Amino acid sequence: MAAAEYQLHCDFMSNYPEVVIRVGKITFGEEQRNIKDRIKEIEANQLKSELEEKLKSQATTLNQAACALLNSGGGVIRAEIENEDYSYKRYRIGLDIEDSFRDCIQHKDFSAYFDFKQEESCMSIFVKSWSSENLAYPRVCSLGTGLYERSSSSAVKMKPTNAVHFLKRKKDEAKRGSKWQEGPDPANVQKCLQQSGMEMEKDINDAVIQFFERERLDLGEILDFTESTTVEFKDFPRDKDNYEFVRNILPRYTSAFANTKGGYLIFGVDNHRRVVGCKRNIDPSQFVEVVGETIALMPAFHFCASEKKIEFLCKALPVYDISENGRGYVFAVRIKPSCCVVFERTPDSWIMEAGEVKRLTYTEWTVLMTEEDPDVSHFADGFQIELSRSCRPPLSKSMYSNRGLTCVKTLQSTLFPVNPDGITCKPEEICEEVFLEYPRVKDVIMKKMEEVSSVGILIFSRSWAVDVGLEKHPQVACDILLVAADSFPTLYTVTMDKGYSVSSTIPVVEYSRNVACTLKQKLVNEGGYAQKVCVIPQVIELGSNGEIKTDLSCLVTYPPGYLVSRDGLEELLQALVIALLRFRSFLSDQIGCEFLNLLTIKQYEILTKNLHKSKKLFIYGLPGSGKTVVALQIIEKIRNTFHCNSGEILYICENTPLCNTVRVGNMCQTVTRIDFLNGFYSRPVKHVVIDEAQNFQLKDGDWYDEAVKLTEADPRQPGVLWIFLDYLQKTHGQVLGLPSKQEPQEWLTVGVRNATEVYDVMIHVMKMIASDRPERHIPYEQLNRLVDEAQCGHSLQGKFDFCSLKGNHKIVTGVIVHKCLQYFKKGYSVKNIAILCSTVEERDSFKRLLEHEMSNHLRDVRQNICFTTADVVEENGIVVDTIHHFSGLERSIVFAVFPHVETKFLIPHLLVCMVSRANLHCHVLLEQSKGFRYFGSQNILLDYKLTQKQHLMEIVNNCIVMEYQRFEFSE
């Protein structure tokens, strides 16, 4: 670790709402850093080498700090100016520092990333976040890659731009399964050279192979081959330790040969190809041991699954003089070409982590350098990319929206519109609420707006801290973010005088600065904003009479480049939309990497409710409208709004698999309804979120009353109780246990999960359920209004298929296996598929048959096939389970075995549950032998003029009619 590293530390007490790194004392200035201009001073005061080392160390310190900020969303470097009488206007910063910054960013104009401001005896260096700008540039800023390659007869440091192409090529080769042949046979190199048409290199390679097979060498003999891409000569030094010499230079040449075509590093031969041997006696066994230990310590990254170590062979060739006296040895180290990536040392690349400057490991660096947008080809044209990793800050992630659903630009124009004729206040509901509750705030804010541009937006929030994932401050009435053209983005934190002493406003100032800093980081690292940006905090304290008691404006100023331009205003607001509406989709598990999606406008509006005034809420969501997504998001809001720990929030659902999925985030306690009634959770609990409540039953206990008791245990400060439910997916005929009056309510009616063809089937069944009323415990009038508002929020096509089979389970499983094999050939994995049944007995029967049937086709599939249940949904297997256990989960491909239950009116509900679990493709399979039990005749099954969808609808309708008639008769 370089000495400079110890001087770097994060300044948490700075006035800047930024990540600030202090680097200690630095000499600035063109003349002051030019050693040639300081000869007299050097002669009088210190040795030239000491000054050179000092200035070099300072430049290294600045580079590491700059690199860390470039890779982490930007920030400020603060340096104490070491030389007196320095002036930035007169002396600039120093040519060597400018050059090192240019090398750091690989850009001619370092002012694109760096701004300088002298503040008395301190220098502030404003650092913009790194962005790759185009696909040829690396995603990560690096001072050095730690990689070497051979170029002609030299080992050349691989520059970051070259490393990008090298790493991507290696990654692509690993994907294709292509690599060098195994074994120490150097014929790989020879074959490669021959195919390349490099005849001279081929001759050299032939000669060095023969050389490596020799048993002895003569002192002074001239070898018949020279240095080349695959050969390097090294003479032992006269005045250095030979072993230490080998340890120092071996990694460089090992990396270069391994990353190119392989080759030979030969010790004891000078630059004239003359055999000189070692100047002092070297123990061959110890030499081989040093070589092995040195290479073993070298970092190597594998894109492939081989995890092979660096392969080499070391040989000692004795050297004799004309009198046959031994004159030491020539040592030849043969390095095999690597299938993947070999580093000389860990890359010189830095990042901010937990408030500290940290050097990236070679694994972290390689992953960041080669990160790509997730492969969503299986989802056809269902998603459009809103934010790509390429050309964005290093920590930003790919962001998608459903094609046809509201895109980022539309979301921005709806949520945060820019009025060309003035300042817009959004959201209107929160704005009006704040102005009504705190009338003086309006006068204060409007007065401040007179100082800014006429084009922009004021975004009101009860707590911007909660919006960016921080805890709300109890003294803060509201936060207002100003984003306006020709102005710096400003965060106004409004506090109320509640008897706090003057000193108590200091934590509020720190709160506001921290929120502003976090918001700026999210705009860059999550919103993908790649321009210069800041957020300046200002605290406005209102007295009890509504008058301004304190106006603590931020004392820091930014360079003009951080002003928001009129052209960049909407781009910045779109980054804000992404930062606020992004969430980790359940598709992440299927794709195998983090998949970030965007909330809908309605989901966002529900999540921005004032939780102090919306303690109880019933959220009705149609199938596929994202109820569980909102439930998980609101848990995080509750934590930060009420300063809760995870144990004080309880998430209740009906089945264990959904519990396990939620439990992974460790955001709260998670229990099933039965465990909740049995008291299997830790106390005290203050807030309760209930999901999939339509599947709850009163017969096992009054779960609703228990939840109310928990949240109202403290009448002075009741907790939050939010209940998510969908009567269309009610899978039982029992009473739920909800109160008759379920107010207040919010509705989610936009389908975002299912392909259009799948959603089309769902909506038909949903309308059937809503129009026929066999059960007394469902509010059908409200259900009809919900279904009337239903709409598919995108244009993802997908596929729906209904198949009526004349046979038993075995025939059905044969069809499923056949279709699964077809999906595997198209590139889908086992994690993309779920097979859903009605009962546990049916599930177990199908699972046994599927395992037997699939075992006959394992040779045709290039992946391990296994069948699992929803309880272990994280495992890599095809899920086979009941719809009850799979509730709340989803898969790209769903096979739904047509429900077979005694209570026929539940069949449409179960069918909606099954079909709604499919993101892309849904196959409904009906065994005819069971189908006859549902109908008085077989005409429906034999009418081939009906489409598949019509066929299914007729069957569902008959189920409803027959059960409805049975209810009428029983009445």
Image: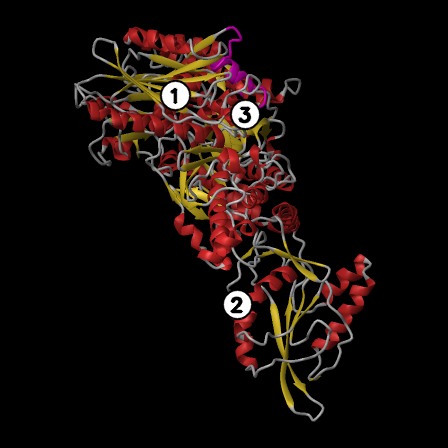
Determine contact: label 1, label 2, CB under 8 Å.
no
Whichever of callouts 2 and 3 sits on the residue coming sooner in the sequence is 2
Say which quadrant the N terminus sits in: bottom left
Q: Which residue is labeled 2 in the image?
A: 294
* Mark 2: secondary structure: helix
Count all numbered tags in the image, as a single digit: 3
Between 224 and 861, the one lying in front of the other is 224
Q: Which residue is labeled 3 in the image?
A: 401
Nearest to the eye among marks 1 and 3: give it. 1
The residue that appears at 56% across and 41% down in the rendered structure is 98
The residue that appears at 24% across and 36% down in the rendered structure is 680
Where is residue 322 shown, x and y percent of the image?
72, 91
Q: Amino acid at mark 1?
A: Leu
As for residue 221 lying within the magenta part, the answer is no
Look at the image and give the residue range highlighted in magenta: 401-421
- Which mark is on residue 829? none
Q: Which residue is labeled 1 in the image?
A: 491
Q: Quadrant of residue 187?
A: bottom right
Distance from Cα at disc 1 to Cα at disc 2:
54 Å
* Mark 3: secondary structure: strand
Q: Amino acid at mark 3?
A: Ser
The answer to whether residue 296 shows anywhere in this view is: yes
Whichever of callouts 1 and 3 sits on the residue coming sooner in the sequence is 3
Where is residue 876 shown, x and y percent of the image?
49, 45
As for residue 416 lying within the magenta part, the answer is yes
Determine contact: label 1, label 3, CB under 8 Å.
no
Left-right relation of 549 to 294: left
Distance from Cα at disc 1 to Cα at disc 3:
29 Å
Whichever of callouts 1 and 2 sits on the residue coming sooner in the sequence is 2
Q: Is residue 783 above or below residue 673?
A: above
